Amino acid sequence: MNADSDRFIDLPEELEGDLIEIGSTLPAWSVEGAFLAGSTIERYPTKLDSAPLFDEIRGRLLAALNGAPGGYAVVRMGNIAQALGVGDQFLRLATAILAEVANPFQPFQRWPLWKELGTNLNANPGLSTGTGYNAFHMDLVNATQPPDYTTLLCVRPDPLGAGASILSDAREAVSRLTSSSRALLADVAYRYGSFFELSDVGEEYTPFPVLDGEPEDLGFVRFTAKMLAEPGLDEGHALAAKELADRMVAGQVSCTLRRGDFLIVNQHRWVHGREPLGDGRHGVTPENRRLLLQLFLRSAGAAGQAAS
Ligand SMILES: O=C(O)CCC(=O)C(=O)O
Ligand SMILES: [Fe+2]
């Protein structure tokens, strides 16, 4: 099934013109600790407010992410990418727009605010930079405070036309489970991933429950299909997680990001992943391979917000 068109935000031509202008004049952002600095957060919205049509777009974006049954949105900025390129000016504009949703931050201490996700032919195919199927997951699943939103900006799509983003409503998938599976998923029985050099995502959470019993917009469906392959997971808990994985796949939608598009996912509600890239990858030169940039957002007032 193709993704629901309400979630795709195309910009009117007049606004594109204004945003191209704004993008070419926005100052570089600053970072304080892991977060976009207060001075940047003050300055960027004022610039966006000078585009009269932006207000409506902000409303649509927030409704797609947080309204019922919100969970993700794709902002289509291909024409702006055409005009500005996908360099600093474009990234400043994208950062300004995302700062309207929540506070951009860099949980990985080793990486910049926008983290490159390139294509590595030697990586494990199922991992982020691999070329295979990247099964449903939420990012930073093993942190007590995962980012509230995750963003993927497309710098270069797969030249072979594959590598669609996949999305599924995790809350909906959970609602279709048997109560015995739900009870198993509430047990502190699941593990996945390493945890090091991270900031402002709380503590390492291992083992963790998939269902935390928190209200929808505070808690998470703490799921990654990769935890199914972790050694030591007993059969009952594995079966319950597999049932959830199957429900997520049954409800999946997909969309292929084009250059200049960015996908924002509300991690409290939806999970994401990626279809395999196209065959014949060895014929694609490295500078033409798929390239995304990833950015994380923290909601104001969320428990993981910088304490300082
Ligand atoms: O390659 C993609 O489209 C998704 C990558 C991803 O979800 C991740 O790295 O966490
Ligand atoms: Fe991801």
Image (cartoon, grey):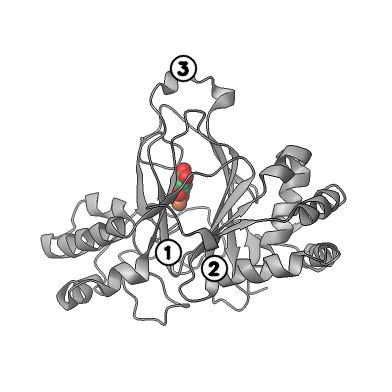
Quick check: is the Cβ at mark 2 less than 8 Å away from ligand 2? Answer: no
Q: Is residue 29 left or right of residue 222?
A: right
Reply above or below: 27 against 146: above
Reply above or below: 59 against 224: below
SS of the residue under disc 3: helix
Please, what is the three-letter code of the amino acid marked with disc 3?
Answer: Gly
Number of on-image labels: 3
**Image coordinates for residue 56, horizontal then vertical, percent:** 71, 69
- Camera-nearest residue between 280 and 254: 254
Q: CA distance from mark 1 to mark 3?
A: 34 Å
**Residue 33 seen in render:** no
Please, what is the three-letter code of the amino acid marked with disc 1?
Answer: Trp
Crowding at label 2, few (<14), some or many (≥20) Cα neighbours within 10 Å?
many
Q: Is residue 211 left or right of residue 272?
A: left
x 62%, y 68%: residue: 60
Residue located beneath label 1 in the image: 270
Q: CA distance from mark 3 to mark 2?
A: 38 Å
x 69%, y 65%: residue: 57
Question: Decide: marks 3, 2 in contact (CB < 8 A)?
Answer: no
Residue located beneath label 3 in the image: 283
Residue 180 location, quadrant: bottom left
Residue located beneath label 2 in the image: 65
Q: CA distance from mark 1 to mark 2?
A: 10 Å
x 48%, y 65%: residue: 146
Q: Tell me the number on the disc at residue 13.
A: none
Mark 1 and mark 2 lie on one chain; the one further toward the N terminus is 2
In the rendered image, the quadrant that contains the C terminus is: bottom right
Q: Is residue 114 left or right of residue 136?
A: right
Reply above or below: 201 against 280: below
Mark 1 and mark 3 lie on one chain; the one further toward the N terminus is 1
